[in-house]
Amino acid sequence: MDTLELARWQFGVTTVYHFLFVPLTIGLSFLVAGMQTAWVRTGGERWYRLTRFYGKLFLINFAMGVVTGIVQEFQFGMNWSDYSRFVGDVFGAPLAIEGLLAFFLESTFLGLWIFGWGRLPKRVHLACIWLAAVGTALSAYFILAANSFMQHPVGYHINPATHRAELTDFWAVMTNSTNLVTFPHTLAASFLTGGGLLAAVAFWHLRTRGRDDEQHVAFRSAARVGTVTVLIAAVALAVTGDIQGKIMTEQQPMKMAAAEALYDTEQPASFSIVTVGSLDGKHEVYAIKVPRLLSFLATGSFDGKVQGINNIQAEYQKLYGPGSYTPIIPVTYWSFRLMIGLGMLAALVAIIALWALRRGRTPRSRILYLLIVALPLLPLAANSFGWIFTEMGRQPWLVFGQLRTADGVSPAVSGGEVLTSLIAFAALYGILAVVEAGLLLRAIRGGLDTAAAPPEPGDGEHPVAFAY
Amino acid sequence: MTLTQLWFVIIAFLWLGYFVLEGFDFGVGILLPYVGRDETDRRVAINTIGPVWDGNEVWLIVAGASIFAAFPEWYATLFSGFYLPLLLILLALIGRGVAFEYRGKRDDARWRARWDFAIVAGSALPALLWGVAFGNIVRGVPLDARHEFVGNLATLLNPYALLFGVTTLALFTTHGAMFLALKTHGPVRDRARRAALRVGPVAALAAVCFLAWTQVRTGTLLSGLLAAGAAVALLLGLAATLPAGRLGPLSGRDGVAFAGTAAATGLAVASLFAAIYPDVLPAVDPAHSLTITNASATGYTLRVMSWVALAFTPFVLAYQTWSYWVFRRRLGRHDIAEAAE
């Protein structure tokens, strides 16, 4: 493998890994803030216990998100220096603003929250977790604005002397239509993931603890909050995803064609749930199709015309010169389906879970529990496939229509260097994944801490705050 | 002042803030086995930086991203050119960050010992390598006409840069010792002061040699004044660490000692930026150097960034300062013991 391929693998591996933690951080920060708000407003002690319990899971996860995030920022310069030169005038600003507005907020107020129990007045302490949560969402906005520029460049021009992108309209970059729909979609995915974890952990405790257990009531509340969150998030995902599909068809028609493996333009176009293709991926052997659905997904009309890969390829060759403008079709086809399918499955499980909780019931079925405990894994996988789809579907472009991935890699870096870092990150990330999963399971099994009383406001130097 | 000059100063300030702040939490990490002879003492030490280390590290993120935004060419050349040192720094920062969060999550001596190793190595390695990296920035690196780095790892491991690596390692260790002396009482404080007096002279010697060498190579009047200020601040800081009464009203004052190493770190960083100005990354062949002009983003981008920085930096500084104020109290063994009950 050459430097380019290694650098691409490294970006894929480190980014997908980083994004396992990010949605959980965003989703859980708001959910924990919500539970703490319930405690502060109602004084209900179960909300305090739940805040501490889920707060611990949140922090175990947060640490991983933070440390893997630093790699992301360095990686643009280390492996993709020609990309950085090309796009730096536009792309650097949202990254710097993300740090200034979001990361400082997140890290400082989370530090205050972790160590501030009983030390800060109750409401000030509550404000800290909310500010940290707002920080996580702001961070998503700015980094997605940067990514949206790669999907759909706006607010720039190419300097004819340097052949580089230069920012002409910052507001346009910040309000890129791609970002305005990608941000809520990502936020909804974060709540799907966070809510899924909340519910799964609660159901696990409902199963292992009898009705008389003092933690039963608390975990019942958590199970309800988690499943309802998943359902609302699923609706938001469907709505935003639908708008995203139409915007994508307009801005990156090749990606939509690749999502369906639609080789020739069709009107109306059907959507296949499953396709078995020939080994070279060029012909379909068997497919289950829903007539007209792709037309609707892509254009909003059941009669809409959807451009095929071959047509767009021919058009792009005229526009951009000879070469292939087609992404790897099996990857886009399957990642698109897995993203949607796994997300819908998560919503289905949440409906079943909510039904099982109706009118004070506690579910008994073992299969049901297994299904629900798997709940957070579905959105986690769907998130990964979503990113794999949207990034692989943009290929061969790094910045759509402007810079090819092959032209973005660092000329000064050798294949050996990239291989070294790829192996180092993969090894370290692998070890940390095992450690993190172990800690999470341990903390989950531990259940609520029912011994210590909630810290009292004004309780100056309550020792509970020494978190390390 | 032009916008490119302004952003040169802002970026210098961000690195200065990063080294002053994370400098002491690196130092605390390095000194962990020395000041923490048992688990309680180690927890005292770690909890002094617990609420703030992550916020300190964000200064690095913002410094890096600001280079990307304001001087894309500098970012591209620097990060791809210093590949392996940056890789090691990243691995160290990952291990260290996770270690702080995870070491206390299991009550198991072996588990904690492993994380303690990650904290020590993950603090010492960046403390050394940031010095090596900055030494090379000041010294100049081989760049071609396209501003691509054409050296290799051996190019970066030269005596000048290594001397600065030793300087930052010793300086941050001293700075961390001063911080611990200021933020704890009991045995941790005593050992921290001893550590400061042992490592401090090494830091002072290395810093004076390095800054003098820099002054001879590329110094300006401003960089010389700043360097002299750094040396004086460091010596004052060390004098303040001496047992009370030894040197009049100055000695035995932890606050003055910490302010001394903080000022020394800040002034040293400022001096280096003053020494390279108007270059941002000097090249061995001066014709290929990256300067504030040829590396910079467009005026429009710099203007947007300036407004954003002007609007939000005061808030950031205010709430970070507030978080230090909230956790201003000294920690001791009894705090941890009470928490364990």
Image (cartoon, rainbow, N blue to C red):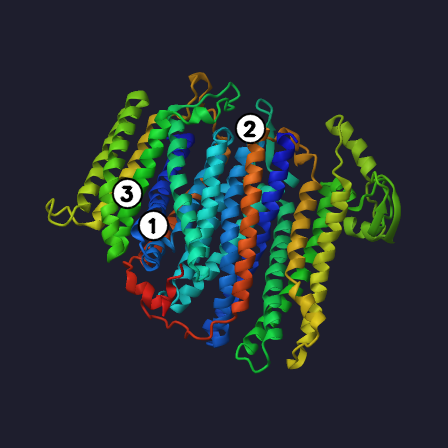
Give how far apart the Cα atoms at labels 2 and 1 are.
37 Å
Among the two numbered marks 3 and 1 on one chain, the one whose residue lies closer to the N terminus: 1
Q: Is residue A111 left or right of residue A274?
A: left
On residue A413, the disc is 2
> Is B289 or A169 nearer to us in this picture?
B289
Label 1 residue SS = helix
Q: Are marks 2 and 1 in contact (CB under 8 Å)?
A: no
Q: Is residue B315 left or right of residue A339?
A: left
Q: Chain of mark 1?
A: B
Q: Which residue is mark 1?
A: B33
Q: Residues within 10 Å of mark 2 (few under 14, many from 20)?
A: many
Q: Chain of mark 3?
A: B
Q: Chain of mark 2?
A: A
Q: Is residue A2 visible?
A: yes
On residue B174, the disc is 3
Count of residue discs: 3
* Residue drawn at (60%, 74%) of the image: A208
Q: Is residue A348 above or below residue A4?
A: below
Measuring from the top left, give residue B125's x and y in whole percent.
Answer: 41, 39
- Residue B202's quadrant in the figure? top left
Q: Residues within 10 Å of mark 1 (few under 14, many from 20)?
A: some
Quarter of the image containing the N terminus of chain A?
top right
Q: Is residue A242 visible?
A: no
Question: Extreme right residue here?
Answer: A285
